[in-house]
Structures are given as structure tokens and as C-alpha cells.
């Protein structure tokens, strides 16, 4: 067997946590070929752009980055070297042919379902046989073919348990770029969780585009999977994201009441508060369904805090529809939320719909919705003043002597304390609150969970 020659791999990642996780997995599959991560593209033997297509201008960002990398690639070739340039992720899936037409110096275009085949694609590209493009949805599941995750992620870790979506919301590219829903078997998830805990993880966030639609072999649903994960020694906290209101079943709601390790913070996108727009979005729930669901969740876990995604300016959205969204926000009270101006995604039903909302109206609505959400987030943080809360210490803070961590509700918390507390859950008293974080003092130096 020929020796493996060490090579440098530079990864640029955009978009969601799942892309961050996928970038780690691509590093894992390339490690046996001698590729080790490097922080700069200069001198890299391979550069992978892991892209996101969910909202506006994604493809343009990719093309401008490719333009810069092309110069580095040319420099390296002039010096007798080689740089493999790959575009992965959802822009690759959606616009693979366009990428090769506009940037013919790209060597590999690969969709999110094909990462397990990356070594083969690298070999093909190295043989200089022109560009390699893999954007099919292969019959085999990539989960079954990826090696065990190798790189430790630290105190807070992510674990993909489900991928893809069959919901086809009118505005969304995910069902086209990530494919149909697929779930990893419970045994695989538990084994990976154990490995992560062995590598110092104390909190695991389960990831999936429709994570609560998880239906992997070996457990009835996400509620049961969470209960099984909670049995792992040393795993203090479990979270999951992103959920769809339609898949929030009673067993999962009950898990919020019964499993202390399941954190009282839930990202549950509603997108709009208008039933007319929710129907046009193909969400298959009403605003009152959402209100009722939140009431059920809060009955199960009184301190549950909510986060959501909102889109303003979906085709057909009137002032009255927008006001219904504002009303829903007032009714629920969010601890945090994301809001976006609708941007047409090619190939999605809403992109071709009539009644597109003028940009100026979208601007006014996004301004109003963000002001309200900011007010709610600030008020939520302010309510923590004086409370003693368990904080998972994640490491040193920004300033000397400071350490940072997370509250159960995902708020960043800063305090003065020893870095040796990293990985412990310690009680802290909140002494000041800010729009995006909390300041605290250590209550006592002992772990409370
Ligand atoms: N325009 C604006 N926002 C969008 N999102 C998804 N697609 C679009 C789009 N075309 C938002 C949704 C989703 C979040 C991840 O991104 O709110 O929940
Ligand atoms: Fe996109 Fe989420 Fe709707 Fe699926 S459920 S189509 S991922 S917004």
C-alpha cells in the first residue's frame, strides 16, 4: 500500500447547523486520504465550499468566493501544485450545472446526499478527467456509509438524526435540495451520542430539517429516542431542532414534562399568524392550532421558552395578514426568533405565484416584526434578573478571568470564574441582563446536575 501523503483541506461553511455538522463529516471521510483541516485557503490542496440556498443571494456569494479561490488555484498551478475546488451543499444541489457553466475551474460539485462518495470523487478529479458532478439522490443512505464521526466537538455537540423534508412549504427549497425525509436508526444515534459524551460533550443538540418527524428504527418516535439518550451517563442536556408544529406528538410533549435533561427551550417555526397565508404556504396548520400546541407544551413544562421563524411578504400577504402575525407574536411571547423577508426561490411554487409583495412593504413589515421580537427577547432576558439558574460552562469568556456558558433557555451567560468549570453545570445568579446575553455571579462552586 502506498503511504498516505499529508494534504491540507480548507472548508468554508455557510448556513445552518446541519451544514456545520456535514462539514465535519466531510473532513472525517477525507481524513483517511491524508487531508487535515487548515484555517486558510492559501496553500490548501483542496477547498470545499459548503453552501446554503435557503434565502437570497446565496448563489452570488458562492460565485464571488469562487472568483477569489480561482486566483489561488491558478497561483498554485503556476508553482507546479494543485488545488481541488469543490462546491457542496444546497447551492450545489440546486444549481450544479450553472456552477460548472459559470465557473468551469470547479473540480467537484456534490449534493448533500453524496458526501460518503467524496473520496471517489476526489480520486476522479485528481485524475484530471474534467469536473465531477454528483447531485443525484443515491439509493443508498449516506448515513449508512459515512464513517463514525471522529472530530471531537467540545462541551456542546451537534448530532444529525434526520435529514430532508416531505412537507413542501410553498416558499422552501429544502425538499428539493435535501430530498425526502430519512431518519437514522436509534442504535446509531445512541452510539454516536455515547462517543460524543466520551469526547467531553455534556449537551447534545439533535439536528434535522424536520427533526420531530424522526421515525428511525428502534424507537417509536423522537420522544422515546430522547428518553433513551437521557439514560447516557454524563449527558446533562438534550435539545433538538428544527421542529414542525404538525409533528409535535403527545409523547414528545410528555417527554418535556418527564425528562429533566430535555431543555425547556424549543425552536418551533410558525412562519405566519394568518390562516390565509398559512394555507397558501401549505403549512397545514392554523394560527390557533399553534396557540393550542404551545398551551399544551407549557402545560407540560411551565418554564418552556419558545423561538420561531417568521416570513413577512409571502405572495398574497396583506396588511391584515401581517397584523395577524403581529397578534400571534403578542399572544405567544417569544424568547427569541428569526424573521426574514420572503425571497423567491427558483422552482418553488410561491416563486411563480402572482401577488408578489412590493419590496418597500416587506421592508416596513420586517422592521416592525423585528422591533417587536427584539422587545420580547429583551423582556424575556430581563425576567431572569435575580434568578439562580443552572449554567453549562462551555469555556473561557471574551475577557480575562471570564468564563462563558449557556442557560437552559440557550441564553449566553458570562461570569468571572475558573476555566476548570468547563463542562460542569453550575448554579449562577443573574446580576444583569442584556438584549442578547446575561451576566452572572457563581452561586457556589459545585455542580448542580
Ligand atoms: N424566503 C424567506 N425566508 C425563507 N425561509 C425559508 N425559505 C425562505 C424564503 N424563500 C426561512 C423560513 C425557515 C427558515 C430556515 O428560513 O422561515 O423556517
Ligand atoms: Fe422547508 Fe421546513 Fe417547510 Fe420542510 S417544513 S418545506 S424544511 S420550511
Image (cartoon, rainbow, N blue to C red):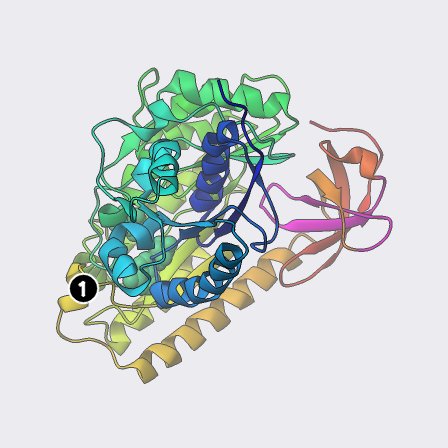
Residue at point 49% right, 44% down? 20
Ligand 1 position by quadrant = bottom left
Residue closest to the eye, 253 or 43: 43
* Ligand 1 closer than 8 Å to label 1 CB: yes
Looking at the image, residue 314 lies above or below residue 281:
below
Q: At 32% from the left edge and 55% from the top edge, which residue is drawn?
A: 91
Stretch in magenta: 399-418
Label 1 sits on residue: 350
Question: Can residue 390 be seen at all in this image of the molecule?
Answer: no
Q: Element at badge 1?
A: helix
Within the magenta stretch, is there residue 408?
Answer: yes
Q: Is residue 125 above or below residue 235?
A: below
Q: Position of residue 391 (x, y in %)?
A: 70, 40
Give whichever of 431, 148 is nearer the camera: 148
Task: Give the residue at the far bottom of this rendering.
Answer: 360
Q: Is residue 369 above or below residue 424?
A: below
**Quadrant of the rendered image containing residue 327:** bottom left
Q: Is residue 32 visible?
A: yes
Question: x%, y% of residue 61?
Answer: 41, 66
Amino acid at each position: 500500500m502506498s503511504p498516505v501523503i499529508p494534504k491540507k483541506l480548507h472548508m468554508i461553511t455557510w448556513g445552518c447547523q446541519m451544514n456545520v455538522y456535514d462539514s465535519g463529516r466531510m473532513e472525517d471521510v477525507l481524513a483517511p486520504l491524508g487531508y487535515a483541516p487548515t484555517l486558510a485557503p492559501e496553500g490548501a490542496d483542496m477547498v470545499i465550499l459548503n453552501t446554503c440556498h435557503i434565502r437570497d443571494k446565496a448563489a452570488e456569494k458562492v460565485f464571488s468566493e469562487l472568483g477569489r479561490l480561482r486566483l489561488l488555484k491558478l497561483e498554485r498551478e503556476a508553482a507546479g501544485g494543485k488545488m481541488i475546488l469543490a462546491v457542496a451543499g444546497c447551492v450545489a444541489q440546486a444549481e450544479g450545472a450553472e456552477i460548472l457553466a459559470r465557473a468551469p475551474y470547479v473540480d467537484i460539485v456534490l449534493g448533500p446526499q453524496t458526501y460518503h462518495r467524496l473520496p471517489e470523487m476526489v480520486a476522479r478529479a485528481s485524475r484530471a478527467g474534467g469536473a465531477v458532478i454528483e447531485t443525484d439522490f443515491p439509493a443508498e443512505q449516506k448515513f449508512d456509509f459515512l464513517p463514525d464521526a471522529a472530530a471531537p466537538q467540545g462541551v456542546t455537540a451537534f448530532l444529525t438524526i434526520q435529514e430532508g423534508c416531505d412537507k413542501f412549504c410553498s416558499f422552501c427549497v429544502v425538499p428539493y435540495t435535501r430530498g425526502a425525509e430519512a431518519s437514522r436508526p436509534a442504535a446509531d444515534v445512541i452510539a454516536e451520542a455515547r462517543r460524543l459524551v466520551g469526547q467531553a460533550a455534556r449537551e447534545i443538540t439533535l439536528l434535522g430539517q424536520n427533526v420531530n418527524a424522526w421515525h428511525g428504527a428502534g424507537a417509536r418516535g423522537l420522544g422515546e429516542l430522547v428518553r433513551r439518550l437521557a439514560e447516557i451517563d454524563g449527558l446533562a442536556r438534550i435539545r433538538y431542532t428544527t421542529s414542525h408544529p404538525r409533528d409535535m406528538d403527545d409523547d414528545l410533549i410528555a417527554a418535556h414534562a418527564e425528562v429533566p435533561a430535555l431543555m425547556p427551550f424549543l425552536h418551533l417555526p410558525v412562519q405566519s399568524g394568518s390562516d390565509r397565508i398559512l394555507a397558501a404556504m401549505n403549512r397545514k396548520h392554523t394560527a390557533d392550532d399553534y396557540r393550542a400546541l404551545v398551551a399544551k407544551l407549557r402545560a407540560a413544562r411551565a418554564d418552556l421558552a419558545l423561538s420561531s421563524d417568521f416570513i413577512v411578504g409571502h405572495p398574497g400577504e396583506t396588511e391584515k395578514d401581517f397584523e395577524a402575525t403581529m397578534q400571534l407574536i403578542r399572544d405567544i411571547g417569544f424568547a427569541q426568533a428569526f424573521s426574514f423577508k420572503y425571497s423567491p426561490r427558483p422552482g418553488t411554487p410561491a416563486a411563480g405565484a402572482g401577488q408578489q409583495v412590493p419590496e418597500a412593504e416587506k421592508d416596513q413589515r420586517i422592521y416592525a416584526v423585528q422591533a417587536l421580537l427584539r422587545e420580547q427577547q429583551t423582556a424575556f432576558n430581563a425576567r431572569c434578573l435575580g434568578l439562580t439558574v443552572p449554567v453549562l460552562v462551555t469555556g473561557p469568556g471574551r475577557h480575562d478571568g471570564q468564563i462563558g456558558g449557556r442557560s437552559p433557555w440557550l441564553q449566553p451567560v458570562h461570569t468571572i470564574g475558573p476555566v476548570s468549570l468547563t463542562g460542569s453545570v453550575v448554579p449562577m445568579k443573574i446580576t444583569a441582563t442584556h438584549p442578547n446575553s446575561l451576566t452572572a455571579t457563581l452561586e457556589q462552586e459545585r455542580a448542580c446536575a
